Image: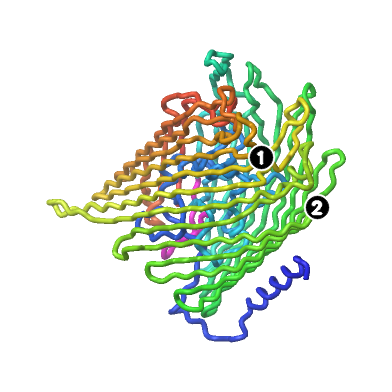
Amino acid sequence: MSKRNLFILTFALTCISAFPLSNAEIDSISRQFELDEVVVSSTTTTPHSVSMQTLDGQALQTLNVHSVADALRHFSGVQIKDYGGVGGLKTIDIRAMGSHHLGVFYDGIEIGNAQNGTVDLGKFSLENVESLALFHGQRNEIFQPAKDFSSASALYIRTRRPQFADGQTFHIVATMKAGAFGVANPSLLYEQRLTDNLHLSLNAEYAYATGRYHFTINHYTQDGTLAWDTTGVRQNGDIQSIRAEVGLFGYLPQGKWHLKGYYYQSERGIPRAIIRNVWTTDQRQWDRNAFVQTNFTNTWNCYSLQVNAKYSNDYLRYLNPDTTAVYIDHSYLQQEVYLSLANRWTLFHWWDLALSADYIYNHLDANQYGATNHDRHTELIVAATDFHYKWLMAQASVLGTFVQDVSQTANVSPAATLRVQPYLPEQLYIQAFYKQSFRMPTFNELYYTDGGISNLKPEDARQYDLGVEYQKRWQITDHRSQKLDIDLQAKVDGYFNQVSNKIVAIPKGNTQYRWQMMNLGYVEMGGVDINASVHCAWSTVHLTASGTYSYQRAMDKTNPYDPLTYNGQIAYTPWHSGSATASIEWHGWRLGYIFNYVGERYSASANIAANYVAPWDTHDLVLSYQVGIRNKDRSADQLKIAVELNNIANKQYEIVKNYPMPSLNGKVVIQYTL
């Protein structure tokens, strides 16, 4: 039986199992319908997953961040690659494995990109985001699509769902942000209760920025002497974008469903690397991303069904009119169809089984000379089991992936997770997981960029993780009988990762545009992630502090005969990095402090002075005030005003070499909620 026929048979079985023969009465008392993952940063919540980090709405307000990429700086083990300021490309690297090994899920369904395999997280605003959750390995949830099991790490972006108090029928949130670099960013959110079980959400946002800021950049020779320096104004960093979302949310006695439409369009300049006093460029990029997706989840006694479907249409055009190098005017149109069926059977209250099957179709059109259209069919099947009893939780899964494009690829990826609570009265957990995964070469790596190789092998990854988490909550009463509530959470994770058949780009000829893709790399990564937070509430005063620290050793093991690169720290991976936040809230006032630090790095595996990238740190402040405004028709509308100061030490730094970041800058945010 062929791999595709095997997948069709399994998919058909999951469809049949979706319609139980018994018409048993729904037991609404013993089982309640399941919501999507609800992630909050409360320190008293029992851990839902090994190596999970979350930020919810309250924490996001303290951090004065406005895009998903900016928020992820406050997760341990995460490195952001930012190519310059407001409109620059922003991707993330998780535990030095590369951005291709991260799955990004928007309201439970992955954002695909078969062309280049990465997602520009700078495009995703936090204006309508309720929570972010980052998982190393995968979620400790077997009732999910097969695609959720396929990535080495996963980021879940959950948008806001309408919630109404008794008597409320609608919400309106109007926000205006303005600040340095010509930033103007209005947005509007409207939520309507259509019926008790049907809610509507509409959200629109416009963003504009010139992206112009002053910078100073210095570069030194290997002996430490100054080679050249440049002072100027960043050029071609402008951006103009619109985003619109519409959602319908329905609730059933034993389940729920939602339908979401998304549209994003932007035009931006692409800042050039600053090398020897040259940084002017006319490079432009146009993006248009649209998708429609739906989810249905329901439970019948001991059986649960989840259905997901999505269609996406993504257009990208890149223009480099500089004829002195290579004139480029390339456009790409991607289309994706995604279907998923997930099934779960509860055999006992402590034992669940799951079977999921996904199908993905990708099609890419390109206007390059000699380029042909390309198609990819991907089928994923996963079987999983979950055992949870008192102090023990154990999960295991086996994922089969079958890909057909220029060749046929099959892969089997097992994973296992264990969590132990050695002393039940205390919230102390010992957690571990092992996971295998792989990532297919992208269409760019196979066919384009003047160096695609059609016989590239997939990258193979293995992950090992061991962690300890402790949570504690206690209450202190002073001599005036006022109570001080303290919540503490601390977590330490050690990990070891291996990536083989790593796809690398080798220069071809004497231009930077011509590259050849090859399977050359083998990398070993080991490190420690530490996270801690404390929240204190006393009367009307709330104090919150948190911190993260990461140590990473990511060694290039590709060529033992190359003394420059062998055992070298791979590109843009610091040995040390971390962040810290602190805030105090009193009677609607909130003052927050944010610190970020990234240690020294190299821009290539050859750890020589010419590739050295200096460490950097930033200090930010945010002051906000929120007040209720009484109205006749409602109890209180809310007005919030916030003032932000970023990089208050006015330091010049680079995240990517030769791409200077902004120095001191500020922003004002006004938000009205009714």
Let me know if residue 414 appears in the view.
Answer: yes
Residue drawn where x is 63% and y is 64% of the image:
308
Percent across and percent down for residue 192 are 53, 60
Front label number (1 vs 2): 2
Give whichever of discs 1 and 2 has the lower sequence position: 1
Gap in angstroms between the C-alphas marked 1 and 2 = 32 Å
Type of the residue with mark 1: Ser
Circle 2 Cα neighbour tier, 10 Å, few/some/many (<14 / 14–19 / ≥20)? few
Residue 10 is a magenta residue: no
627 vs 513: above or below? below
Q: Residue furthest right?
A: 370
Mark number, residue 492 = none
496 vs 271: above or below? below
Percent across and percent down for residue 344 are 56, 72
Tell me the element at label 1.
Answer: strand
Let me know if residue 176 appears in the view.
Answer: no
Report the side of 264 relative to 578 (left or right): right
- Residue at which label 2 appears: 406
Report the side of 593 relative to 405 (left or right): left
Residue 162 is a magenta residue: yes
Quarter holding the N terminus?
bottom right
- Residue at which label 1 appears: 266
Quadrant in which residue 164 is drawn: bottom left
User: For the image shown, how many numbered marks are present on the structure?
Assistant: 2
Residue drawn where x is 61% and y is 62% of the image:
259
Query: In the depicted view, which residue is nearer to us: 46 or 328?
Result: 46
Q: Which region is colored magenta?
A: 157-174
Residue drawn where x is 54% and y is 38% of the image:
80
Percent across and percent down for residue 553 are 50, 39
Residue drawn where x is 35% and y is 38% of the image:
591
Report the side of 271 relative to 466 (left or right): right
Type of the residue with mark 2: Val
